[in-house]
C-alpha cells in the first residue's frame, strides 16, 4: 500500500488534469493518482513524460528496453508491470524481456541494444558514464537521439525512485 493517500480525482482543482490524463493515457494510473496530490507537479510531470514517451524520435523498442532495464536495476515492479506490455507491443520479444536482468551474457541483444543497455546501466548505477560507454552508444545515434536517450534514462530513473519512495504498486486499492 502506498505511503500516502491517493488524490481525490473528483476535486475541482485536479479535474482538468484528470481529463487530460484520461485523454492521453486512457486512465489515471496509480502514479498519476499520487502525483495529483500536487497539481503543479502532476502537470509538469505529465508534460515532461508526454515529451519523452510520445514526442521523442527514439524508437519505441529502444525506449521500452531502457525503461524495463531501469525497473530491474531499481527494483521498481510497478514500472515493470506497466511497461512490459508496451515493450512487447513496441517490438521487444518475451525472451528479451526475460533476459534483461543478465543481458551481458545473452545473445538476444544486437550491438546497438548492448550499447544502449551499457549506457543505461552506467547512468543508473554510477551516474557518471565512462567515455568508452558513451562513445559506443553515440555511434548508433544522432545527437538528437543521444539527448533523447539520455533524457529517457534520466526520466525513468526519476519515475522509479518516486514510485519506490512512496511504495506505489499495481495491486494498491483505488
Image: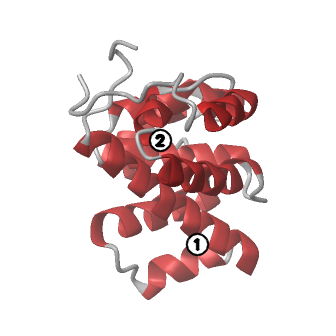
Residue at 68% across / 27% down in the picture? 22
- Residue pointed to by mark 2: 68
Question: In the rendered image, which quarter contains the N terminus?
Answer: top left
Left or right of 24? Residue 38 is left
Q: Is residue 146 above or below residue 70?
A: below
**In the rendered structure, are the residues bearing label 1 and label 2 in contact, judged by CB atoms less than 8 Å apart?**
no
Residue at 51% across / 79% down in the picture? 134
Q: Nearer the viewer, residue 169 or 114?
A: 169
Q: How are the residues colored? A: secondary structure
Which secondary structure, mark 1?
helix
How far from the left and from the top, in percent, is residue 88?
63, 28
How far from the left and from the top, in percent, is residue 124?
36, 62
The answer to which quarter of the image holds residue 123 is bottom left
Which label belongs to residue 137?
A: 1
Q: CA distance from mark 1 to mark 2?
A: 18 Å
The answer to whether residue 142 is seen in the rendering is: no
How far from the left and from the top, in percent, is residue 11?
51, 28
Residue at 56% across / 26% down in the picture? 28
Which label belongs to residue 94?
A: none
Mark 2 surroundings: few (<14), some (14-19) or many (≥20) residues within 10 A: many
Amino acid at each position: 500500500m502506498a505511503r500516502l493517500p491517493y488524490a481525490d480525482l473528483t476535486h475541482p482543482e485536479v479535474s482538468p488534469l484528470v481529463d487530460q490524463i484520461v485523454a492521453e493515457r486512457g486512465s489515471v494510473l496509480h502514479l498519476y493518482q499520487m502525483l495529483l496530490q500536487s497539481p503543479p507537479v502532476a502537470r509538469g510531470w505529465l508534460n515532461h513524460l508526454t515529451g519523452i514517451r510520445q514526442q521523442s524520435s527514439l524508437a519505441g523498442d529502444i525506449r521500452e528496453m531502457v525503461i524495463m532495464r531501469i525497473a530491474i536495476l531499481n527494483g521498481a515492479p510497478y514500472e515493470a508491470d506497466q511497461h512490459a506490455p508496451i515493450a512487447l507491443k513496441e517490438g521487444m520479444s518475451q525472451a528479451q524481456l526475460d533476459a534483461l536482468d543478465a543481458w551481458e551474457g545473452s545473445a538476444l541483444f544486437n550491438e546497438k541494444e548492448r550499447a544502449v543497455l551499457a549506457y543505461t546501466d552506467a547512468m543508473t548505477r554510477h551516474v557518471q558514464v565512462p567515455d568508452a560507454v558513451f562513445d559506443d552508444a553515440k555511434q548508433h545515434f544522432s545527437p538528437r537521439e543521444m539527448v533523447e536517450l539520455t533524457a529517457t534514462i534520466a526520466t525513468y530513473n526519476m519515475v522509479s525512485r518516486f514510485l519506490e519512495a512512496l511504495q506505489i504498486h499495481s495491486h494498491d486499492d483505488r
